[in-house]
């Protein structure tokens, strides 16, 4: 894709995934509205530490409006990222998956809260089983994964010119081969993730909702995926992949315009740690502050990876990218 040709597929992915999310909430809202004669007024809308004791209440109209508003706000946020900064295929896929997941979450919250009170005359009698909470979080991940798979990746787009003349090179002779391999893991984000896992597990045990233990297990998988990567430079280009297999990305050597070392500030540039989208649409695998490998590629795309010995990786990638121009 050229610098601007990505806009049509990015906006298409953002639009259809947002409509799918809003459609899910709309369908569930209609279903719940047909139950209004069988529901107490007001409805229990929040449960405290013990899921058998509701401590918050609202009308059916407010519950439907609140669920819809939650989905609308997040879909606008996610879609805006894809609409304006969706130059990379992985960004478009994550936007679509995020929209679909938040739509499933909003619809699931509305449906589960109403379903557990259908037939009751007093909302104080309502209970919300722990397995329901876990299902509302986990089940929408399935359509979200499908949405990510539906969105096409980046087409192969060789760079139109040579690698930047002032980019660092590695002194390989003739057809001499070389491979650069590093692990990128840990960092502050992993500490935050560990705390979140422990807290959610303790809450599940404290309220004796054993089904909710699926949430810290899921968080453990997510944080393992987001905070441990292998980074490899070889004749094919740069490959960055989570130790669990996804997410990951590959930059072909013939798409590289320049590889260099850059100083990375996670909060200021990317808003946090992990697989991130930074200002201007730059994709970042950001695990810590400090030196990172910056790869500028065709189509106005760029990738940043915080990894040790980034200077060697950049020099080798430029050298191998040079060879693809011959």
Image (cartoon, rainbow, N blue to C red):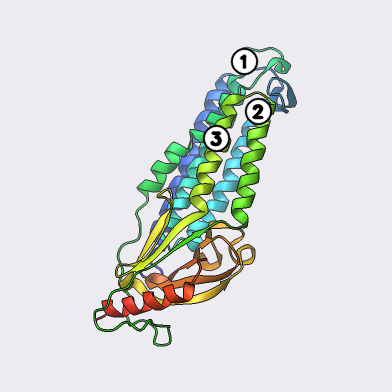
Q: Quadrant of the N terminus?
A: bottom left
User: From mark 2 to mark 1, how far is it between C-alphas?
Assistant: 36 Å
Q: Nearer the viewer, residue 29 or 252?
A: 252
Q: Mark 2 or mark 1: name the one nearer the start of the chain.
A: 1
Residue at the (64%, 29%) spot, across then down: 204
Residue count near mark 3 (Cα–Cα under 10 Å), binned few <14, some 14–19, many ≥20 = many
Q: In this figure, what is the number of numbered marks? A: 3
Residue 75: image x %, image y %?
54, 47
User: From mark 3 to mark 2, how far is it between C-alphas?
Assistant: 18 Å
Is residue 111 positioned above or below 326 on the image?
above
Q: Secondary structure at mark 2?
A: helix
Observer-side mark, 1 or 3, equals: 3
Decide if residue 210 is in sight here: yes
Q: Nearer the viewer, residue 310 or 150?
A: 310
Q: Mark 1 or mark 3: name the one nearer the start of the chain.
A: 1
| Label ID, residue 205 | 2
Left or right: 54 in relation to 275: right
Left or right: 253 in relation to 273: left
Q: Which residue is mark 1?
A: 37
Q: Marks 2 and 3: in contact by CB < 8 Å?
A: no
Q: Quadrant of the C terminus?
A: bottom left
Q: Which residue is mark 3?
A: 137
Observer-side mark, 2 or 1, equals: 2
Is residue 200 positioned above or below 53 on the image?
below
Left or right: 148 in relation to 214: left
Q: Mark 3 or mark 2: name the one nearer the start of the chain.
A: 3
Q: Secondary structure at mark 3?
A: helix
């Amino acid at each position: 894709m050229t610098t601007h040709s990505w806009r049509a597929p990015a906006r298409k992915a953002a639009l259809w995934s947002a409509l799918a999310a809003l459609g899910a909430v709309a369908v569930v809202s209609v279903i719940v509205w047909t139950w209004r004669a069988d529901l107490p007024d007001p409805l229990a809308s929040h449960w405290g530490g013990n899921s058998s004791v509701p401590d918050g209440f609202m009308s059916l109209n407010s519950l439907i409006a609140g669920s819809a508003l939650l989905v609308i706000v997040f879909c606008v946020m996610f879609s805006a990222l894809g609409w304006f900064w969706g130059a990379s295929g992985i960004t478009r896929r994550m936007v679509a998956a995020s929209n679909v997941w938040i739509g499933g979450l909003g619809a699931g919250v509305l449906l589960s809260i109403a379903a557990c009170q259908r037939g009751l005359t007093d909302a104080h009698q309502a209970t919300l089983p722990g397995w329901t909470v876990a299902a509302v979080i986990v089940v929408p991940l399935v359509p979200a994964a499908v949405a990510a798979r539906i969105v096409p990746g980046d087409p192969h787009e060789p760079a139109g010119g040579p690698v930047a003349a002032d980019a660092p090179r590695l002194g390989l002779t003739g057809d001499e081969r070389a491979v650069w391999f590093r692990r990128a893991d840990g960092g502050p984000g992993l500490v935050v993730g560990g705390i979140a896992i422990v807290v959610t597990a303790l809450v599940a045990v404290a309220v004796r909702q054993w089904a909710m233990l699926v949430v810290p297990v899921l968080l453990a998988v997510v944080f393992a995926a987001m905070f441990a990567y292998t980074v490899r430079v070889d004749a094919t280009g740069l490959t960055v992949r989570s130790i669990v297999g996804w997410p990951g990305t590959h930059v072909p050597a013939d798409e590289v315009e320049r590889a260099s070392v850059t100083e990375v500030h996670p909060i200021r540039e990317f808003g946090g740690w992990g697989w991130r989208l930074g200002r201007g649409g730059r994709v970042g695998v950001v695990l810590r502050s400090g030196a990172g490998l910056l790869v500028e590629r065709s189509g106005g795309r760029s990738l940043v990876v915080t990894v040790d010995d980034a200077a060697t990786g950049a020099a080798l990638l430029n050298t191998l990218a040079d060879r693809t121009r011959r």
